[in-house]
Amino acid sequence: MTSTVDVTVLADLLRRAAKAEILPRFRRLGQSDVRAKSEATDLVTEADEQAERMIKAEAERLWPGALFLGEESVAADPDLLHRLEHADLAIVVDPVDGTFNFAAGIPAFGVMASVVSGGETVAGIIYDPMGDDWVMAEKGGGAWLRRPEGSAERLSVAAPVELEHMVGMASTGYLPQEKRAEVLGNLAKVRFLTNYRCAAHEYRTFAGGYVHYLMYNKLMPWDHLAGTLIAQEAGAYAARFDGSAYLPHHLDGGLLIAPDKASWDVLRHEVFTV
């Protein structure tokens, strides 16, 4: 299944924006180039804003009529978010995922985009500016690591393992306070827990078969639509905490991703008891 958006063109647009607006500012931001939004760790930089401005302008030229939903556009106009559910075609963009890392000079950030058609995610792209490659998927077409010279490698999730051997990533900071300590205690049952503070690289790591679970509670579409589709196309089982499918308009309900349904059930019952 393909959308009316050529994903290779969109992928190239993300790369061009990164080279023009993001990489030249990495480790070169001035104090006035970084600002806090909702809290001290929720940052926006000139790179975020300028990259999104470039991607938006080009996307509107290439695909007129498509709803453009960017993290910084929604920060300026929150009503945009509510149009996603009913849009015939939408392009959802996170210009710099991992802004905290980017602002701190840590080379773990990415540029993400997804295509939503009729309320369903049909394509996802995660570009790594530092590695200069993409992880991407179209619904029904598998998940792929693609490089600018044209090479491609199909991705597959890790083989299932017992709970005590699982290695994974969980964003616990947005869990309800009364449940956070419980979940953190439960995580002693797995082998390792980590968090990159960058969903782009967490999804890439998972789809590449290096970890066994991802967990998120705050569900903004630019953070999770691309990665969830890529994970599913790599063979993963993904669902909200109540077992329902994760859809583009969902903003809550949590998200748990595992190599298969059996692993998902064990993690949900033993660890993520939200």
Image: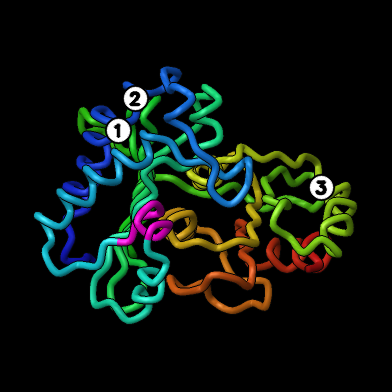
Q: What residue is disc 3 on? A: 190
Q: Quadrant of the C terminus?
A: bottom right
Q: Is residue 196 visible?
A: yes
Who comes first in sequence, dot 1 or dot 2? 1
- Is 72 magenta? The answer is yes
Q: What residue is disc 2 on? A: 23
Towards the viewer: 113 or 148: 113
Kindly state the secondary structure of the residue where label 2 is placed. Answer: helix
**Image position of 181 with respect to 151: above or below:** below
Relative horizontal placement of residue 111, taking residue 191 as reference (left or right): left
Disc 1 marks a residue whose amino acid type is Ala
Q: Quadrant of the N terminus?
A: bottom left
Kindly state the secondary structure of the residue where label 3 is placed. Answer: loop
The part of the image, by quadrant, that contains residue 87 is bottom left
Towards the viewer: 104 or 131: 104
Q: Nearer the viewer, mark 2 or mark 3?
A: 2
Q: Is residue 135 visible?
A: no
The circle drawn on residue 18 is 1
Relative horizontal placement of residue 258, taking residue 94 as reference (left or right): right
- Is 104 magenta? The answer is no
Which residues fall within the magenta stretch? 69-76
